[in-house]
Image (cartoon, rainbow, N blue to C red):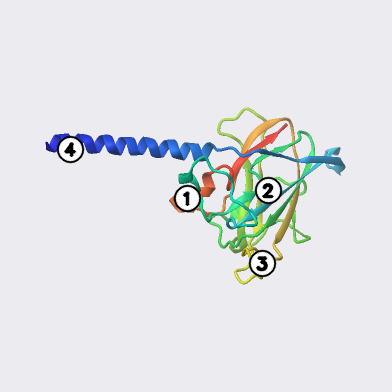
């Protein structure tokens, strides 16, 4: 009898682990609709005159009646990610190849001290800078990071090298907010970078704003929330 109970328990645990992995993978691989940068005119760059495309993303601390949460593949995932921060309106991004691209971030979340100060600096932009509320800077204080937007290679990729990392400044805890709890004067960050030949990359936030191991779980590893794909076409 004891041996049978141990065997049954092992089977139940095994099924639970498999089910958990399946749910995790379904959440991790959920892919929202593609948000494509819009090409409008040209820009003079160090590499000559290039097509110029623009894209706008917002970062919210949580969903509300005003801003619904990203879609999830199951109610379990919705409950697991409830109240977590996310990028809006999509994390599946597409930009043109061999072009100058400007992304504007509207950042509504708070923040704090980032673990790795490397990600408090700007990397990969056209001139090594970004603008924060109209001021040109090369980085922000490591203690004032809200999130980051960090694009990098897939492991062992043979496509063109591409790396971009932008720190998004936090809003103060006492910032004036609207009825949904969002700052009425959020941080506005703008960066311009140059793309090369086509390639597909991944991006994520490097500020620990999730749960589980070192706060890098949950939304931090979930496409549609704080991670996604970045396609150069």
Where does residue 103 sit, x and y in percent of width and height? 74, 48
Q: Secondary structure at mark 3?
A: loop
Q: Quadrant of the C terminus?
A: top right
Q: CA distance from mark 4 to mark 1?
A: 32 Å
The residue lying furthest to the left in this view is 1
- Residue 38, quarter of picture: top right
Q: Is residue 46 left or right of residue 206?
A: right
- For marks 3 and 2 on the same chain, the one whose residue lies earlier in the sequence: 2
Q: CA distance from mark 1 to mark 3?
A: 25 Å
* Numbered disc in front, either 2 or 1: 1
The residue lying furthest to the front in this view is 65
- For marks 2 and 1 on the same chain, the one whose residue lies earlier in the sequence: 1
Give the camera-side residue of 153 and 109.
109
Give the camera-side residue of 114 and 72.
72
Numbered tag placed on residue 123 in the rendering: 2
Q: Residue at x 68, y 53 (%)?
A: 58
- Residue 203, quarter of picture: top right
Q: Residue at x 79, y 37 (%)?
A: 99
Q: Secondary structure at mark 2?
A: loop
Q: Are the two marked residues, 3 and 2, in contact with CB atoms closer than 8 angstroms?
A: no
- For marks 2 and 4 on the same chain, the one whose residue lies earlier in the sequence: 4
Numbered tag placed on residue 5 in the rendering: 4
- Residue 197, quarter of picture: top right
Numbered tag placed on residue 79 in the rendering: 1
Where does residue 165 sit, x and y in percent of width and height? 65, 48
Numbered tag placed on residue 178 in the rendering: 3
Q: Secondary structure at mark 4?
A: helix
Q: Residue at x 49, y 42 (%)?
A: 74
- For marks 4 and 1 on the same chain, the one whose residue lies earlier in the sequence: 4
């Amino acid at each position: 009898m004891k041996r049978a109970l141990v065997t049954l328990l092992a089977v139940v645990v095994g099924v639970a682990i498999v089910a958990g992995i399946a749910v995790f993978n379904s959440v991790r691989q959920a892919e929202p609709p593609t948000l494509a940068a819009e090409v409008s005119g040209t820009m003079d760059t160090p590499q000559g005159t290039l097509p110029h495309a623009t894209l706008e993303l917002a970062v919210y601390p949580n969903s509300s009646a005003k801003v619904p949460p990203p879609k999830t593949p199951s109610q379990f995932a919705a409950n697991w990610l409830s109240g977590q921060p996310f990028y809006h309106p999509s994390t599946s991004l597409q930009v043109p190849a061999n072009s100058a691209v400007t992304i504007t971030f509207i950042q509504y979340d708070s923040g704090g001290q980032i673990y790795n100060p490397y990600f408090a600096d700007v990397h990969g932009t056209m001139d090594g800078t970004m603008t924060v509320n109209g001021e040109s800077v090369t980085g922000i204080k490591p203690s004032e990071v809200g999130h980051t937007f960090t694009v990098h290679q897939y492991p062992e990729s043979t496509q063109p090298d591409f790396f971009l990392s932008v720190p998004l400044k936090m809003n103060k805890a006492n910032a004036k907010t609207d009825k949904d709890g969002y700052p009425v004067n959020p941080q506005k960050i703008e960066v311009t970078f140059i793309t090369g030949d086509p390639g597909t990359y991944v991006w994520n936030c490097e500020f620990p704003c999730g749960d589980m191991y070192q706060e890098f779980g949950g939304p931090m590893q979930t496409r549609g929330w704080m991670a996604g794909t970045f396609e150069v076409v």
